[in-house]
Image (cartoon, coloured by chain):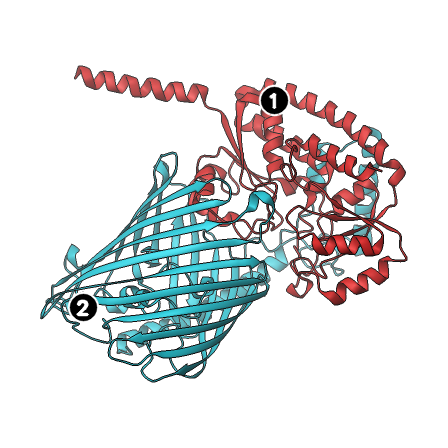
Chain colours: A red, B cyan
């Protein structure tokens, strides 16, 4: 009997102990959301990203280790707009975690907090891999990331009310940093306003609009369809008269064609970090946009 | 086997399918009528408030003008207007995800007496519609999800089940028409194969299509630092429920010919371990077992055991995210009680699949099956020694279409060597279904 009581008390104490020290586990599909949650939650949260910054978010393996992460999540933050439809539904079902299913308190579809661009009213697969709800690569836009940071901080307060003051303090700091940084970035890129760029995949509309840049076309003839010689030749002859300054691409896209295209069109190829972790040394959203501005303003 | 009950079952399925199609259409119509109109549709529907398109435009212009003004005054937007600005269309939310997948192939055999697998495989010279699948899925409510895969080509339900989403203690229950979660190959649908035909061991031990039936499953994700899933399944073996298996008999093969005890069900157990060896390497290892009635001896038993390893390298951390190399190994062994004594046979396959770029894949596979103790009670159901080698190359114009060329060389004991060549086309329309690992 005594041993039973002893075992029971050890179990109870351990559980209490675990709960007392338990952090809010935030699992995000996009590494940027995990970085934002770390910044906004400090040591009250523990964050994991299902996608690596170097990885194409369209094609992620629904690995059982990711199932385990979703299973243990208190909050799931996703990109939405169909970008993760090839793999996230499997993880959600296999996770057995009711707390992070759509509609539950621990589910946050970040796309609900941004204004979608390039919404396609009647999507058709002849248009390539288009998303009816709009271009899902909104994480390339600083203002969009700010809105999502706001949503994440409010969500953290809702699911961990005990940390409300801590989250508020951190949010205030974040907001101030954003305003300062945003002004600084804008000042640096102002002289480049109106610059024309060619994109590899149409991932950059949110960033381009923020920069005041214009897209002169994409190397992919249609989203998700690899570049074809005829399309690239046509694009090249089109852009030769247009003074295109940059070719934008992501780390996970092949670079041989982009380099050739840049050379032939007189533009500069820039591999921009679309996500946190895409290039070495990019650990926060600040790092990401600092680097983007650096890469674009380098002589 | 077109016995009357089976035909009745199929007729019922046909009616059910028609009803489903009709109700789906009706629901789509309702959703269209009731849901908010996309911003760019011109005419005002019956559900709309009485504003003209021009007024709508004026209102949106005024709202976005105000928001722009606020933004200009205050700098970056705040969340309250961010939520208001959200224009995600919601009209189609309650229509389940539906997709149709077609697999068709042309094949030619050189040499007589080639191995025949039935099911989705192509067994004779010429063309074959290998599969015409309709997949439907969606959330039922916060507690259940519903998935269905219906084979339109042969009016057969491949899968139709509900899955619980939030049971306590990491438990999950699935119930309905299920595929046996035995090994790696059996739970995979035709359109996820990297070859035109399934491994010989699949046909020998599982089924010509899939081992499965109507039943239930319970599984648990263990609270360990790595992924360990333990799973148990139970299947009804009455033939009219559509029980399919190459290893186990139906209740018709028992003495009583009726389901009257726990021994008349078929059972599956599986343990799956997954090890994440850094971001780029994955290793999945499973052990499976299945037990049930012998198809050869009334009240005889069959035990089937297997292990499977899936090893994958995909260098995502260096940005080479389209490149992937995967090795799959599966080994199965079976003991069947038969009139002439116990029979033991085994089989398996080893498979190397390489994805070079997003559009190109290639694969090599070797498979075999063999009786190593006893004599076959039925050479068609349990063939003598067979082996085969396959090489396949796949071109994927997009994520929704595939063109595959495959070469097979194989032999069955006491027969001549044969060669075969296949050309396969696969297309899918509708919702893009998520892939399992």
Q: Can you identify the residue that label 1 sits on?
A: A167
The local secondary structure at tag 2 comes to loop
Residue B344, quarter of picture: bottom left
Q: Nearer the viewer, residue B425 or B320?
A: B320
Give left or right: position of B163 versus A107: left
Distance of label 2 from label 1 (alpha carbons): 65 Å
Q: Nearer the viewer, residue B47 or A180?
A: A180
Point out residue A29 in the picture as x, y percentages from the top left corner: 56, 41
Point out residue B108 in the picture as x, y percentages from the top left corner: 44, 82
Chain containing mark 1: A
Q: Is residue B63 visible?
A: no
Q: Nearer the viewer, residue A235 or A23?
A: A235
Give left or right: position of B232 versus B67: left
Q: Kindly identify the residue that appears in the image at 31 percent across and 75 percent down.
A: B411
Q: Is residue B346 visible?
A: yes
Does the residue at mark 2 contact the one at mark 1 (Cβ under 8 Å)?
no
Classify the position of the N terminus of chain B by image quarter: bottom left
Point out residue B35 in the picture as x, y percentages from the top left corner: 63, 54
The local secondary structure at tag 1 comes to helix
Q: Is residue A179 above or below residue A198?
A: above
Q: Can you identify the residue that label 2 sits on?
A: B295
Give left or right: position of A204 versus B316: right
Q: Residues within 10 Å of mark 1 (few under 14, many from 20)?
A: many
Give left or right: position of B260 versus A161: left
Q: Residues within 10 Å of mark 2 (few under 14, many from 20)?
A: many
């Amino acid at each position: 009997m005594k041993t039973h009581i002893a075992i029971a008390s050890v179990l109870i104490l351990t559980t209490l102990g675990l709960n007392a020290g338990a952090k809010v586990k935030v699992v995000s599909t996009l590494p940027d959301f995990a970085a934002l949650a770390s910044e906004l939650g400090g040591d009250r949260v523990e964050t994991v990203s299902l996608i690596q910054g170097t990885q194409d978010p369209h094609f992620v393996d629904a690995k059982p280790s990711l199932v385990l992460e979703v299973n243990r999540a208190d909050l799931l933050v996703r990109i939405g707009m169909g970008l993760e439809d090839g793999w996230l539904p499997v993880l959600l079902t296999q996770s057995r975690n009711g707390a992070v299913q759509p509609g539950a308190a621990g589910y946050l579809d970040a796309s609900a907090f941004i204004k979608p661009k390039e919404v396609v009213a009647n999507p058709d697969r002849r248009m390539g891999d288009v998303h009816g709800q709009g271009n899902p690569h909104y994480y390339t836009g600083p203002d969009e990331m700010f809105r999502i940071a706001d949503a994440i901080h409010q969500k953290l307060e809702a699911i961990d009310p005990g940390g409300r003051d801590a989250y508020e303090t951190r949010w205030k700091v974040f907001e101030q940093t954003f305003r300062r940084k945003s002004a600084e970035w804008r000042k640096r890129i102002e002289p480049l306003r109106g610059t024309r760029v060619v994109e590899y995949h149409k991932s950059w509309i949110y960033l381009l609009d923020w920069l005041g840049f214009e897209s002169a076309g994409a190397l992919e003839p249609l989203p998700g369809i690899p570049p074809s010689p005829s399309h690239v030749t046509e694009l090249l002859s089109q852009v030769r008269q247009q003074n295109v300054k940059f070719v934008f691409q992501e780390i996970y896209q092949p670079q041989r064609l982009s380099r050739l295209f840049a050379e032939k069109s007189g533009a500069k190829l820039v591999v921009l970090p679309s996500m946190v972790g895409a290039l070495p040394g990019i650990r926060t959203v600040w790092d990401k946009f600092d680097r983007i501005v650096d890469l674009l303003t380098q002589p | 086997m077109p016995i009357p009950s089976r035909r009745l079952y199929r007729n019922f399925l046909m009616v059910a399918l028609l009803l489903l199609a009709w109700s789906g259409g009706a629901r789509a119509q309702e959703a269209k009528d009731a849901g908010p109109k996309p911003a760019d549709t011109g005419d005002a529907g019956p559900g709309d408030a009485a504003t003209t398109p021009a007024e709508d435009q004026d209102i949106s212009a005024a709202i976005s003008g105000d928001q722009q003004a606020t933004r200009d005054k205050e700098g970056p937007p705040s969340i309250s207007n961010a939520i208001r600005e959200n224009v995600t269309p919601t009209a189609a939310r309650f229509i389940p995800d539906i997709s149709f997948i077609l697999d068709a192939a042309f094949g030619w055999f050189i040499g007589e007496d080639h191995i025949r697998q039935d099911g989705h495989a192509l067994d004779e010279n010429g063309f074959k519609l290998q599969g015409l699948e309709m997949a439907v899925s969606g959330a039922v409510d916060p507690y259940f999800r519903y998935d269905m895969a219906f084979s339109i080509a042969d009016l057969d339900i491949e899968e139709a089940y509900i899955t619980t989403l939030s049971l306590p203690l990491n438990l999950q229950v699935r119930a309905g028409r299920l595929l046996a979660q035995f090994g790696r190959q059996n739970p995979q649908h035709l359109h996820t194969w990297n070859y035109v035909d399934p491994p010989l061991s699949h046909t020998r031990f599982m089924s010509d299509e899939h081992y499965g039936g109507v039943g239930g499953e319970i599984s648990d994700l263990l609270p360990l630092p790595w992924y360990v899933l333990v799973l148990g399944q139970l299947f009804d073996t009455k033939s009219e429920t559509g029980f399919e298996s190459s290893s186990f008999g139906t209740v018709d093969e028992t003495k009583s010919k009726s389901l009257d005890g726990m021994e008349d069900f078929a059972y599956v157990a599986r343990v799956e371990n997954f090890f994440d060896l850094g971001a780029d390497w994955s290793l999945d290892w499973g052990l499976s077992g299945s037990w049930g009635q012998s198809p050869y001896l009334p009240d005889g038993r069959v035990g089937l055991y297997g292990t499977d390893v899936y090893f994958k390298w995909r260098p995502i951390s260096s940005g080479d995210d389209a490149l992937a190399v995967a090795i799959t190994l599966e080994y199965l062994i079976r003991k069947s009680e038969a009139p002439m004594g116990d029979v033991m046979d085994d089989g398996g396959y080893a498979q190397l699949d390489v994805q070079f770029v997003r559009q190109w894949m290639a694969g090599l596979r070797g498979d075999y099956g063999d009786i190593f103790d006893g004599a076959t009670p039925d050479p068609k159901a349990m063939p003598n020694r067979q082996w085969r080698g396959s090489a396949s190359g796949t071109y994927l114009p997009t994520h929704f279409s595939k063109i595959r060329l495959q070469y097979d060389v194989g032999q069955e004991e006491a027969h001549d060597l044969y060669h075969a060549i296949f050309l396969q086309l696969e297309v899918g329309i509708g919702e893009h279904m998520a892939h399992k690992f």
